[in-house]
């Protein structure tokens, strides 16, 4: 008896994990894992599409996290990633530090930048928050373009070769791709875990009603600062992938164009979905690489895709899922009702009865 | 027994077949006969250098017309040549994406381009990782590109320091400028361009009264003009495009009476055709670069200009980009003709040997390569004059032959470059 109880508890826990969302995530991760095995020219597909999708997605995911759970639209996420990239270039190339301490220090610098930005911007909200983060990112861009002693101005820091970390050699593009995939999945897990933690619930509460949470004794600004710092940390993880993908760092990393690209990736993927950004990243990477095979006006094509997504899928491409599901369920319903109208009344009644019985 | 024989025989047959296939594969692919040549062109088609692609196509069109081909390809000694184009926006990021796509996805044998200096430095770094592909530069001009040690990278035009070759001496000795104030945009091209000028000027005995490095896109020069010391003999203007035009019109308003020395892209048509009446300050400006003045005439130049004018989307006269792209592409084409379309193996060694040994008379003078696969070229000094119709134009002062690359790359500097 007790063993059957245990089994049912087990299967309950197990069932709790089998949600549509988790199944989709698992499928996407599996697709990510087999990606290098199915593409015909890995030396093109892995860096130009795979790794690019992963760093754009990771950085855009930090933007989506802030928007979804904190209610703040930050335009400085690309800048935090760029600061981390600059850190790796400065510590490892300019100062000659070993690569692992350089990466750790740079993640710290990227997060610190997020913390400082939060101290300045956290008291504002909506459009004002967006403008302040945009302004700060532009300040950093101007500084990076000028500060020749630190950033080597426009020329940037190059080359920053992919390192051999001892236990893993990132020089091999397939290994590097899996390293990037691991970091992207790790970032996703961090955000999912955070969102479900007490801290995550508190920031979601703050998003819905800062006054009420404040009345309950929560220090609203401190929570927001912590969330922004965490998002900057994850953006910095994206910056690690980015700098080893590009093998250099220059001011174009933190330019307005790059910032807006991340926003486009987030919106195309789905601004309300943590995982959807990778679809946005994939679409964006494909457009960047192949749009000009179809037309000379490929920037226009990219713009049209963006407008199309906004018009037809306001929730982003990830919003396609529910739409398809609704279509299917509608079709299933119509076919079911059609089938039921064909069946004799007695059987239908019996069916209902059976169902009820099962339910009991 | 039979089955045992079968079991043993099968792997032997399989291995033999595989070896045979591999060998035949080797003789077809690795044995060296080139069946087709694919050239991937990198050029800018958006951003502030968006016209780069049209100019590149015009230049390639001129060159390909000579062998009966078009901008999409042709034939060299029976070997078909295909040309594919990849647009960029002039940044290192887009060049990196585009060059990887050309090499890894489109499978090109030769990469031709890019346009901007930022792109060039990135492409050279990528060239180091793909030794099997040959790279011929388009118009990117940072000094360091041919000093990076990429054996597969060739540049058939001068770098931006070489473009100032002869101007420093001319300014000091002929014009008598002893002290110059420097205003230049804050990025790699002006560093090298100004570095080339000031190293020669300072070596001749001149001195620098101050340097202002301004961000690209600066529109207000009033505070900088106010900083120019009174005892300055001339002002060096290392600006380009709209920035140069803004500076010239504000220099008129502010009453700058000093003569000017222009960087290579300061006195192009954009700056000289500005709305304001800039003749007061612009006339007498001297500059150096790879583009001869309008009064220059050689049979090769005339032939090029005539053929260029026939190209779709051609400018009224060839820009610096079309000239550099033409000289570079034609060098490549001549080398391909030399090897009769056979690139050689391993690593296209026949083509590379032909490129290295090439010497020909281009529209802008004789071009040959040094040991770093960097061209030794002619350089031109020009001066801005007012034409009979009152319009500003340029006049050629001199043509220096055999200008060689220095071994120094420049960064932002204060005073004279170190």
Image: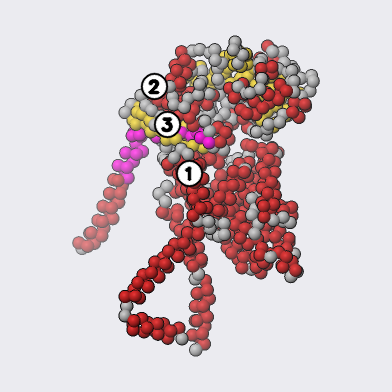
Q: Which chain is mark 1 on?
A: A
Instruction: Judge depth for marks 1 and 2 and give the one in front.
Output: 1
In percent of the image, x 57 and y 63: which residue is there? A189
Q: Which residue is mark 3?
A: B349
- Between B186 and A213, the one nearer to me in the picture: A213
Span colored in magenta: B22-46
The vertical placement of B397 against A297, above or below, is: above
- Of marks 3 and 1, the one in the foreground: 1
**Which residue corresponds to mark 2?**
B66
Q: Nearer the viewer, residue B212 or A221?
A: A221
Nearest the eye: B254 or B263 = B254
**Residue A127 coordinates in the image, percent (x, y):** 67, 52
Residue located at (58% from left, 53% from top): A60
- Label 2 element class: loop
Q: Residues within 10 Å of mark 1 (few under 14, many from 20)?
A: some
Read off the residue under disc 1.
A301
Horizontal and vertical percent position of residue B368: 50, 21
On the same chain, marks 1 and 2? The answer is no
């Amino acid at each position: 008896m007790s063993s059957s109880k245990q089994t049912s508890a087990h299967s309950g826990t197990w069932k709790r994990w089998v949600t549509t969302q988790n199944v989709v995530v698992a499928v996407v991760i599996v697709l990510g894992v087999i990606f290098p095995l199915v593409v015909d020219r890995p030396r093109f597909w892995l860096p130009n599409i795979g790794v690019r999708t992963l760093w754009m997605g990771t950085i855009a995911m930090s933007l989506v996290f802030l928007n979804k759970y904190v209610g703040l639209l930050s335009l400085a996420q690309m800048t935090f990633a760029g600061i981390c990239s600059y850190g790796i270039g400065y510590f490892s190339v300019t100062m000659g530090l070993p690569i692992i301490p350089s990466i750790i220090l740079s993640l710290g610098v990227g997060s610190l930048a997020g913390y400082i930005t939060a101290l300045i911007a956290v008291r504002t909200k909506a459009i004002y928050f967006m403008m302040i983060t945009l302004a700060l990112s532009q300040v950093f861009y101007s500084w990076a373009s000028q500060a020749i002693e630190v950033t080597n101005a426009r020329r940037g820091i190059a080359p920053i070769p992919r390192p051999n970390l001892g236990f893993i050699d990132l020089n091999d593009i397939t290994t590097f791709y899996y390293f990037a995939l691991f970091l992207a999945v790790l970032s996703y897990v961090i955000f999912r875990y955070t969102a479900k933690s007490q801290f995550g619930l508190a920031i979601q509460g703050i998003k819905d009603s800062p006054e009420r949470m404040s009345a309950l004794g929560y220090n609203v600004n401190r929570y927001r600062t912590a969330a922004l710092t965490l998002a900057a940390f994850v953006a910095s993880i994206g910056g690690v992938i980015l700098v080893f993908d590009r093998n250099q760092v220059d001011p174009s990393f933190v330019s307005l164009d790059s910032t807006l690209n991340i926003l486009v990736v987030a919106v195309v993927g789905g601004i309300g979905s943590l995982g959807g950004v990778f679809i946005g990243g994939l679409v964006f990477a494909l457009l960047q690489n192949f749009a000009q095979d179809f037309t000379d006006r490929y920037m226009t094509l990219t713009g049209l895709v963006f407008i199309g997504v906004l018009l037809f899928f306001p929730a982003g491409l990830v919003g396609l899922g529910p739409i398809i599901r609704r279509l299917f369920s509608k079709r299933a319903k119509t076919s079911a009702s059609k089938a039921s109208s064909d069946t004799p009344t007695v059987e239908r009644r019996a069916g209902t009865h059976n169902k009820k019985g099962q339910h009991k | 027994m039979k089955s045992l024989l079968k079991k043993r025989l099968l792997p032997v047959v399989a291995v033999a077949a595989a070896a045979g296939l591999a060998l035949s594969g080797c003789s077809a692919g690795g044995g060296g006969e080139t069946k087709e040549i694919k050239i991937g062109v990198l050029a800018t088609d958006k951003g502030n250098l968006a016209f780069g692609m049209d100019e590149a196509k015009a230049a390639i069109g001129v060159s390909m017309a000579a062998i009966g081909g078009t901008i999409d390809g042709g034939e060299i000694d029976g070997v078909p040549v295909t040309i594919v184009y990849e647009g960029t926006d002039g940044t290192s990021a887009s060049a990196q994406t585009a060059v990887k796509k050309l090499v890894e996805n489109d499978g090109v044998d030769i990469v031709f381009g890019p346009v901007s200096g930022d792109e060039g430095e990135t492409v050279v770094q990528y060239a180091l990782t793909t030794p099997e592909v040959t790279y011929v530069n388009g118009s990117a001009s940072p000094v360091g590109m041919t000093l990076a040690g990429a054996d597969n990278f060739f540049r058939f035009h001068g770098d931006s320091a070489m473009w100032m070759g002869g101007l420093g001496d001319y300014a000091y000795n002929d014009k008598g400028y002893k002290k110059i104030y420097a205003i230049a945009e804050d990025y790699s091209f002006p560093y090298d361009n100004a570095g080339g000028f000031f190293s020669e000027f300072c070596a001749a005995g001149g001195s620098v009264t101050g340097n202002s490095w301004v961000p690209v896109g600066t529109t207000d020069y009033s505070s900088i003009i106010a900083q120019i010391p009174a005892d300055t003999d001339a002002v060096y203007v290392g600006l380009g495009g709209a920035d140069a035009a803004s500076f010239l019109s504000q220099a008129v308003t502010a009453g700058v009476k000093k003569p000017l020395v222009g960087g290579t892209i300061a006195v192009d048509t954009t700056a000289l055709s500005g709305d304001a009446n800039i003749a007061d300050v612009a006339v007498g400006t001297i500059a150096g670069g790879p583009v001869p003045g309008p009064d220059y005439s050689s049979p090769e130049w005339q032939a090029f200009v005539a053929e260029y004018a026939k190209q779709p989307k051609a400018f009224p006269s060839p820009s610096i980009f079309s000239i550099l792209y033409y000289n570079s592409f034609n060098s490549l084409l001549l080398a391909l003709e030399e090897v009769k379309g056979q690139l050689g193996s391993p690593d296209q060694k026949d083509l590379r040997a032909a490129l290295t040994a090439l010497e020909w008379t281009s529209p802008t003078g004789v071009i040959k390569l040094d040991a770093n696969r960097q061209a030794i070229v002619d350089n031109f000094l020009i001066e801005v004059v007012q034409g009979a119709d009152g319009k500003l134009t340029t006049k050629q002062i001199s043509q220096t032959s055999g200008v060689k690359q220095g071994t120094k790359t420049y960064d932002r500097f204060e005073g004279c470059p170190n």
